[in-house]
Image (spheres, rainbow, N blue to C red):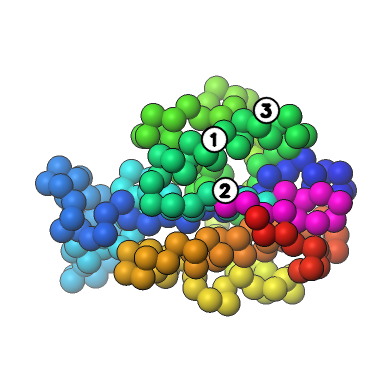
């Protein structure tokens, strides 16, 4: 199984609304967000402006500020992150990294809820920014058995599609050190726009990648990688 793990790139992304606030949008984007927000209203006082904090959920209205990755070799995990304010630079660097991976024997991608969030989010943002999608990420035109993507949430569901199971919950169930010891996903936009602390967000993202690696090991009845064997690049 250790050899199997050496062929996987583990990843997690952090996203935020494309603008700091609703008022910063141009008129066309305001109109389009207004239409999107209509379907999101749950309370009488919900407005497009009050709901704008959720824009980071949608690739059409948000942007990627961090992609953290991890590979496992010889029982050690090696992490590398791509982060910054310029999404085009970030995505181009990540795309170049992906294109080089097959030459190093890495041919699979793994994320938690990756098939519903991380993988399509990256693809959409690459297309929006005019970046050609690397072959190992692109699923267009591929048959299901040709798609080299592993989704730990899908593995956990065993075919049950009724519920979302968070990485945080699964780390608790499998006694994996939690990555939620500082901030959580709901804090990312605030930490980015109000505190301008990309390093803190990157470190949080890397903790999720470590948790993801450990979860897949638990799902394969393998021992956890000791913290001393985690290398942060």
Please tell me which residue lies in front, 161 or 111.
111
- Give the residue at x 67% y 59%: 232
Disc 2 element = loop
60 displayed left or right of 158: left
- Give the residue at x 33% y 43%: 60
- Magenta segment includes 73: yes
Percent from the top left, x then y, of residue 9?
Answer: 68, 45
Whether residue 192 can be seen here = yes
Q: Residue furthest bottom?
A: 181
Above/below status of 101 relative to 39: above
Please tell me which residue lies in front, 88 or 160.
88
- Measured in 3D between alpha carbons, the distance from the residue under mark 3 to the one under mark 1, in whole angstroms, is 20 Å
Q: Of discs 3 and 1, which sits in the foreground? A: 1
User: Which residue bears the numbered disc 1?
Assistant: 95
Percent from the top left, x then y, of residue 114?
Answer: 57, 48
Quadrant (top left/top right/bottom left/bottom right) for the C terminus? bottom right
Whether residue 166 can be seen here = no
- Measured in 3D between alpha carbons, the distance from the residue under mark 2 to the one under mark 3, in whole angstroms, is 16 Å
210 displayed left or right of 7: left
User: Which residue bears the numbered disc 3?
Assistant: 146
Q: Are marks 3 and 1 in contact (CB under 8 Å)?
A: no
Percent from the top left, x then y, of residue 141?
Answer: 55, 22
Q: Of discs 2 and 1, which sits in the foreground? A: 1
Q: Residue furthest left?
A: 27
Disc 1 element = helix
User: Which residue bears the numbered disc 2?
Assistant: 114
The residue segment tinted magenta is 71-81
Percent from the top left, x then y, of residue 117?
Answer: 50, 48
Number of numbered discs on residues: 3
Is the magenta region chiefly helix, strand or loop? strand
């Amino acid at each position: 199984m250790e050899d199997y793990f050496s062929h996987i790139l583990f990843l997690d992304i952090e996203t935020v609304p494309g603008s700091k606030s609703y008022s910063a949008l141009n008129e066309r984007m305001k109109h389009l967000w207004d239409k999107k927000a209509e379907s999101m209203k749950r309370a009488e006082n919900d407005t497009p402006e009050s709901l704008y904090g959720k824009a980071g959920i949608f690739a059409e209205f948000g942007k990627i500020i961090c992609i953290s990755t991890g590979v496992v070799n010889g029982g050690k995990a090696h992490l590398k992150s791509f982060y910054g304010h310029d999404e085009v630079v970030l995505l181009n660097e990540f795309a170049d990294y992906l294109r080089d991976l097959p030459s190093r024997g890495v041919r699979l991608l793994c994320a938690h809820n990756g098939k519903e969030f991380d993988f399509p989010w990256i693809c959409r943002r690459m297309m929006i920014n005019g970046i050609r999608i690397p072959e190992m990420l692109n699923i267009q035109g591929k048959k299901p058995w040709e798609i080299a993507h592993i989704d730990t949430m899908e593995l956990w569901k065993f075919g049950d599609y009724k519920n979302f199971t968070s990485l945080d919950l699964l780390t608790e169930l499998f006694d994996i050190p939690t990555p939620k010891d500082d901030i959580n996903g709901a804090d990312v936009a605030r930490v980015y726009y109000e505190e301008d602390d990309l390093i803190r967000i990157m470190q949080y993202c890397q903790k999720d990648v470590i948790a993801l690696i450990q979860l897949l090991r638990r799902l394969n009845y393998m021992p956890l990688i000791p913290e001393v064997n985690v290398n942060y690049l």
